[in-house]
Image (tube, rainbow, N blue to C red):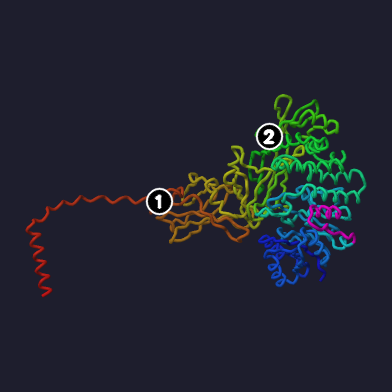
């Protein structure tokens, strides 16, 4: 059988982190005869080589190539390319891992779209990954019509014959940005690039020991000399003009301007920051004209203009101001309707805990930046305006899996509001409504079992910042925070607020015991009543009646006595059950609710905050379970006994004498 995919992994002292990579490969949905793996050991000195040799001995489709240390990942990746036999070559890092169906899905998607390069959706665990690129599937795109330049890491599939045709190899030796040079050349030579966004294919992780190669401080001189090599490739393969300027703007934005903004600049040692600035300015003034600067966001253009004008002090002053910017969000409403969770919220940027403001100049909206007169003049001479495109501001709401960082954009309808702030300035507030359907929120598929967090991201005037939602919320939100049963088979979706900050999250399909922890909120024990022989429990479950059978069950339990089920009927947010009084009489019983679980295939039982007490006559009542059981009535005290007078002394002496004579007779 033809090998579909060859996976190439450069390996150098990954330690325990290689295990996740290995397990991800062993779980692949492609059969072992459909793909092969090459671990290229680049002179590791830990236990990894022996571990990989044992792995290869157990799995014929996994191979290990040992070579002397080369100092970086370029040479081992090239070794893997030379050994590969697959139609496509997939590069992965030794401390990352693949989604279980990644290779199969990416291969099929690439074949279907005749792609030379296939990019699978990425998740960042503790590190950033592209966002806009993976909003939708992009079957046949190029750098001219898609934000491919947002992703220049090599963790993609490349058609092997395409690499051979253009003799494409990674730059070797200890260096930086060899992946940029390789990937941008592939983008520009490819006839078609396919972006698969509806399945999470690749997991980027941040190692606990902080030793990811990309996170290490670099030598600015060597780094930007390596970056010039990527620029050289672009100049070789494009003509001067808008496309080249747009491609160049990626490096101006990410590798230069963003390194000189906000906390990212301020946390650097001052001497290193100044050296970094000098090297950045060298590239900017050599290679980037006004057309490149025009392709980046307004505030980024300001920083680029200050670099051109050599105004480093103004760059630092602006960084200090930007470091104080933070996004804020208020959760205004939360309601279930027809199995959908409706979320209303308001968002706004703040600076130093006060709302960010913009200036008005006639019909123009202007950025209120802390710049010197010299800086303002220099920007004017470069035709860099301080106009603030507030009308293009927007907000996203993202649901993100807490463990593996899978995330999905929710549909949002937003509205911009200008709020007068006095002195000719105004604030910008964004109100928004979003709908979360648990059965389609994961890119058209159901949210899987687990904890999912809600994040909002404000995009305005070149700032794109993210925060959690829910810590600040309206007074009426709690009333709408119900648990819902959705899907078929049914499972519970429970919105809750996290401990501490109080951010909004979802527990899907009872991943934790949060239902029991939240039961006091979901049910008021004082409102639970017995009517005749039926108990009515006002449980805040937004229950839908569609589907076979009742969605919830009740039972009454007492240790060492038994468990007695009861027929339950759910009606809106009330659960009613007929009490089996003849079995419960004379005792106090715990009440448990059985909620369906799609993952378990059966109900998961949770204790409610109420108990049922049935007296000897069969009369029942509901009490708070934390109420201690009634103590039995104390027995009446009997009359005190009269004290007897002590025996006379002669009687006690006679008794002792008698006992002594008896003992003497026994011993004689």
* Residue 208 rendering spot, x and y as whole percentages: 65, 54
* Residue 243 rendering spot, x and y as whole percentages: 89, 45
Q: Nearer the viewer, residue 326 or 287?
A: 287
Give the farthest residue toward the left: 650
Give the farthest residue toward the front: 271
The N terminus: image quadrant:
bottom right
**From where the camera sits, is residue 222 visible?**
yes
Residue bearing the label numbered 2: 351
CB atoms at circles 1 and 2 under 8 Å apart?
no
**From where the camera sits, is residue 107 visible?**
no
* Residue 26 rendering spot, x and y as whole percentages: 71, 66
494 shown above or below 362: below
At 83% from the left and 37% from the top, the residue drawn is 308
User: Is residue 169 found inside the magenta-colored segment of the image?
Assistant: yes
Q: Nearer the viewer, residue 244 or 485?
A: 244
- Report the Cα–Cα distance between label 1 and label 2: 56 Å
How packed mark 2 is, by other alpha carbons closer than 10 Å (few <14, some 14-19, many 20 or more), is some
User: Where does the magenta region start and end?
Assistant: 165-186
Q: Nearer the viewer, residue 608 or 180?
A: 180
Residue bearing the label numbered 1: 629
The C terminus: image quadrant:
bottom left
Query: Which picture quadrant has residue 490?
Result: bottom right
* Residue 130 rendering spot, x and y as whole percentages: 76, 49
- In the image, taking residue 317 as reference, residue 619 lies left or right, namely left
How packed mark 1 is, by other alpha carbons closer than 10 Å (few <14, some 14-19, many 20 or more), is few
């Amino acid at each position: 059988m033809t090998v579909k995919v060859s996976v190439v992994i450069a390996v150098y002292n990954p330690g325990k982190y290689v295990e996740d990579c290995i397990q991800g490969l062993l779980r692949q949905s492609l059969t072992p005869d459909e793909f092969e793996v090459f671990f290229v050991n680049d002179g590791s000195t830990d236990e990894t080589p022996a571990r990989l040799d044992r792995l290869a001995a157990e799995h014929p489709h996994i191979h290990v190539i040992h070579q002397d240390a080369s100092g970086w990942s370029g040479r081992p990746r090239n070794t893997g390319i030379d050994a590969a036999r697959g139609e496509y070559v997939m590069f992965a890092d030794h401390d990352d891992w693949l989604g279980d169906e990644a290779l199969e899905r990416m291969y099929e998607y690439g074949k279907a779209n005749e792609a030379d390069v296939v990019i699978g959706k990425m998740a960042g665990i503790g590190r950033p990954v592209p966002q806009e690129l993976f909003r939708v599937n992009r079957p046949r795109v190029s750098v001219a019509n898609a934000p491919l330049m947002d992703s220049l890491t090599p963790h993609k599939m490349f058609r092997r014959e395409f690499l051979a045709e253009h003799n494409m190899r990674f730059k070797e030796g200890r260096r930086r940005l060899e992946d940029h040079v390789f990937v941008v050349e592939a983008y520009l030579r490819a006839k078609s690039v396919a972006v698969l966004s509806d399945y999470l294919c690749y997991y980027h992780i941040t190692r606990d020991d902080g030793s990811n190669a990309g996170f290490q401080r670099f030598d600015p001189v060597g780094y930007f000399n390596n970056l010039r090599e990527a620029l050289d490739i672009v100049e070789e393969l494009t003509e001067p003009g808008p496309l080249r300027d747009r491609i160049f703007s990626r490096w101006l934005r990410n590798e230069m301007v963003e390194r000189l903004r906000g906390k990212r600049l301020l946390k650097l040692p001052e001497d290193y920051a100044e050296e970094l600035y000098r090297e950045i300015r060298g590239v900017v003034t050599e290679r980037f004209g006004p057309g490149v600067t025009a392709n980046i966001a307004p505030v980024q253009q300001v920083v680029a203009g200050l670099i051109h004008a050599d105004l480093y002090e103004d760059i630092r002053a602006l960084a200090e101001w930007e470091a104080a910017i933070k996004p804020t969000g208020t959760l205004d409403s939360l309601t279930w309707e027809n199995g959908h969770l409706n979320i209303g919220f308001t968002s706004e940027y703040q600076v130093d805990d006060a709302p960010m403001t913009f200036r008005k100049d006639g019909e123009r909206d202007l950025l209120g930046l802390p710049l010197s007169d010299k800086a303002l003049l220099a920007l004017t001479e470069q035709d860099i305006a301080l106009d603030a495109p507030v009308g293009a501001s927007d907000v996203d709401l993202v649901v993100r899996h807490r463990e593996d960082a899978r995330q999905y954009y929710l549909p949002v309808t937003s509205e911009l509001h200008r709020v007068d702030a006095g002195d000719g300035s105004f604030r910008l507030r964004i109100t928004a409504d979003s709908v979360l359907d648990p059965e389609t929120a994961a890119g058209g598929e159901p949210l899987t079992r687990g904890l999912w967090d809600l994040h909002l991201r404000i995009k305005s005037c070149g700032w794109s910042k993210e925060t959690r939602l829910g810590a600040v919320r309206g007074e009426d939100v709690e009333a709408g925070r119900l648990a819902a049963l959705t899907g078929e088979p049914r499972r519970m979706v429970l919105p809750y607020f996290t401990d501490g900050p109080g951010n909004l999250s979802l527990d899907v399909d009872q991943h934790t015991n949060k239902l029991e922890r939240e039961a006091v909120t979901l049910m008021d024990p004082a409102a639970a009543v017995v009517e005749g022989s039926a108990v009515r429990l006002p449980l805040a479950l937004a229950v839908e009646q569609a589907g076979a059978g009742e969605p919830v069950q009740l039972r009454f339990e007492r240790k060492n006595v038994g468990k007695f089920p009861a027929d339950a009927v759910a009606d809106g947010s009330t659960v009613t059950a007929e009490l089996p009084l003849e079995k419960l009489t004379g005792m106090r019983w715990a009440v448990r609710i059985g909620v369906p679980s799609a993952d378990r295939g059966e109900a998961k039982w949770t204790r409610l905050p109420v108990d049922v007490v049935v007296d000897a006559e069969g009369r029942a009542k509901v009490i708070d379970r934390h109420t201690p059981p009634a103590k039995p009535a104390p027995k009446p005290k009997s009359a005190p006994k009269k004290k007897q007078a002590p025996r006379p002394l002669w009687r006690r002496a006679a008794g002792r004498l008698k006992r002594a004579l008896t003992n003497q007779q026994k011993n004689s």
